Image (cartoon, rainbow, N blue to C red):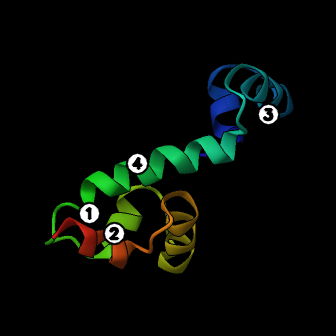
Amino acid sequence: MTLESVAKEVYVTPAYLSILFKRELKINFVDYLHKIRIQKAQELMKNQNLKTYQVANMVGFSDEKYFSQVFKKYTGLTPSQFRESLL
C-alpha cells in the first residue's frame, strides 16, 4: 500500500491526499501506515509459531531488517525483545 495507490482509489492526487492526511490526522501517511502495521505485527507476534520474517511479510514489509528497525522505532523494543516480554 502506498500513498499513490490510496490516492488513485479515492480519485485525488498523492500530494493533495498527503496534505489532507496531515491536516486531519496530524500524522503523515507513512507514519500512520507504519503505526497500523506495527500494531498488527504485535498481535501476530503473540503466535510463537510465526517467525519474524513471516510476520514482517504479513504486515507488508518485504525486508525483515527494515521491519525490525521500524518495529523498534514505534515500540522501543526489537521484535525479539517484544516476544520475550510476552513470555
- The residue carrying mark 4 is 39
Name the front one of labels 3 and 2: 2
Position in image of residue 59 (x %, y %): 41, 55
The CA span between labels 4 and 1 is 10 Å
Q: CA distance from mark 2 to mark 1?
A: 8 Å
Q: Amino acid at mark 3?
A: Pro
Which residue carries the number 1 mark?
45
- Tag 4–tag 1 contact (CB < 8 Å): no
Which residue in the protein does label 2 denote? 82
What residue sits 70% from the left and 36% below the top? Answer: 27
83 w.r.t. 20: above or below: below
User: Callout 1, which amino acid?
Assistant: Met
Q: To which residue does mark 3 refer?
A: 14
- Distance of label 3 from label 2 (alpha carbons): 34 Å
Name the element at disc 4: helix
Against 45, residue 7 (above or below) is above
